Amino acid sequence: MRSGGSTAALDRAALGVLTLCFACVHVIALKSQLFTRFGGSPHSAETPINYKTLYFDQKIDHFGFAEDGTFKQRYLVADKHWHQPGGPILFYTGNEGDITWFCNNTGFMWEIAEELGAMLVFAEHRYYGESLPFGQESYSDTKHLNYLTSEQALADFAVLIQNLKRTLPGAHGSPVIAVGGSYGGMLAAWFRMKYPNVVVGALASSAPIWQFPGMAPCEQFYKIVTQVFAKSGTNCQANIRRSWKAINNVSSTAPGLQWLSEEFSLCRPLKDTIDVIAFKSWLQETWVNLAMVDYPYAANFLQPLPAWPVQVVCKYLGFASNVSDGQLLHGVSQAAKVYYNYTGSTSCLNISQTATGSLGFLGWFYQACTEMVMPMCTNGFTDMFEPEEWNFQAFSDECNAMFGVRPRADWADTVYGGKDISAHSNIIFSNGELDPWSSGGVNYNITESLVCIMIPEGAHHLDLRYSNARDPPSVRAARALEVKYFQQWIKQVANTP
């Protein structure tokens, strides 16, 4: 999820995600990172995935009274290991996508359910998956999209939990712990802050709750991406930095455009400057995604990838500084194909696509254009990308052109407290040091019960993935500590009169 913002963004229409020919690579790229989110490691034989799919009638608008309609919110329940009565409930706060994808890939919850005697509940976020407030009309216009907010989603979760505790035999006294990663992690943290009467604690993994205006340096995200590549191979980040000029040089002629298109096996040949801008944006997002999913084992998350994929990519980018543009870009093309064609089954590369189709791109674009304003910028010195300033006005204009709405830059600070959250309690903020989104995460202990767990070898929410023989000790320790906090919170409830 990257948001940038010079007026150059207005020239980047060609990315065209979801066939939206809109000049906003920043809004488009915004989704492609942050909340991409869970890797598809295979299900553990010890933890089979069995759950019931259920639906709950939710109000379309929890905060007004003129709209009294309802919709079916999907949620998934696994109660095989639940200790009745009063056993804990681990509640996954759904991200911006199909809830079954998150359910199938949040291995940490499945693996600790028996130890805790817990029921697992995975709640789908409104406007994603099957939980569409207005059915097929939900994305038809801004009026129908008006109820797509994090506040409405949190209210959905609170109402659903209260209903479960009223209607499920044995659940009345069950302590509920919120769990989420990426945007879901932000929601988990905010859920505990806003509804402490509903959830006793929260695990917010890779949750950039401070990636908002005035809270984090806009250049830090891309600095971390660059650091991941710099430590993964000699000259790797330096050659990516040089590649942008090489692309500009080669693409200045028609034969050069043709060569680039063929070298990168593009599905559609590059025709003009706008295409080249889109091509470079696609490459930039590719490097970001690779840093996010730099897991220590082979995984099928955004794409099927080998173990430590950035190290594999960097093997193609170890050139000396005097190589020709053609040699350099051949290496870049081979590196990009590690991400897009590691299995060898892809016939051509589509520059309008970088991640899984299980995520709700259009919905996230709308959220980015309203509440989720996350400034990012590049400078070409502390990072390996072409310089681009953050320009809120350009970003706002892009959003207005796309949806007819303008973002509220300071709303997250106002409604969720910004960096002034010390009055809250029982939230774990876990972050991987390889994860670019740690730039906007909570990376230090705020109080004794608002704690940070840093994972040096961790990429994006590695701790929420299934355990693996190649997991580094740091993530094993993080998971063990998270379980101890869960047990502590559960015991606190049990000891409360």
Image (cartoon, helix red, strand yellow):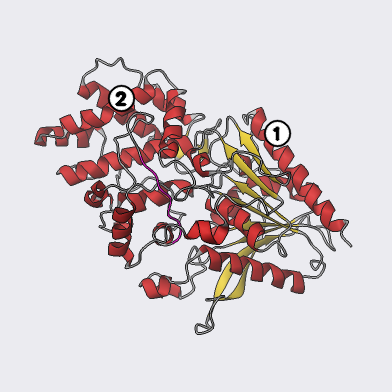
Q: Quadrant of residue 322?
A: top left
Q: What stretch is highlighted in magenta?
A: 371-377
Instruction: Say whether disc 1 or disc 2 marks the residue closer to the N-terminus.
Output: 2
Residue 477 — which label? 1
Determine if the magenta segment contains residue 375: yes
Percent coordinates x, y for residue 178 in the rendering = 67, 55
Q: In the rendered image, which quarter contains the C terminus? A: bottom right
In depth, the one of 185 and 469 nearer the eye is 185
Q: Residue at x 39, y 32 (%)?
A: 338
Seen in the picture, residue 46 relative to 237 is either above or below; the reply is below
Q: How far apart are marks 1 and 2 (CA)?
A: 38 Å
Residue 138 in view of the camera: no
Residue type at mark 2 is Gly
- Residue occupying the point 56% across, 47% down: 207
Q: Mark 2 points at which residue?
A: 331
Where is residue 36? Give x, y as percent: 48, 48
Kindly identify the residue that appears in the image at 50 percent across and 33 percent down: 294
Judged left or right of residue 39, residue 343 is: left
- Give the SS element for disc 1: helix
Q: Mainly helix, strand or loop, the magenta region?
A: loop
Specify whether 316 is left or right of 200.
Answer: left
Q: Is mark 2 on a helix, strand or loop?
A: helix
State the mark number for residue 172: none
Location of residue 462 in the rendering, given as x and y in whole percent from the top left corner: 59, 39
Estimate how packed mark 1 is, as few (under 14), some (14 to 19) or many (20 or more) residues with alpha carbons within 10 Å: few
Under mark 1, the amino acid is Ala
Choose top left, top right, bottom left or bottom right for residue 388: top left
Q: Given this view, does label 1 or label 2 mark the residue nearer the observer?
A: 1
Taking depth in this image into account, of 32 and 186 the one nearest to the observer is 186
Tell me if residue 236 comes above or below residue 396 in the rendering: above
Viewer can see residue 382: yes
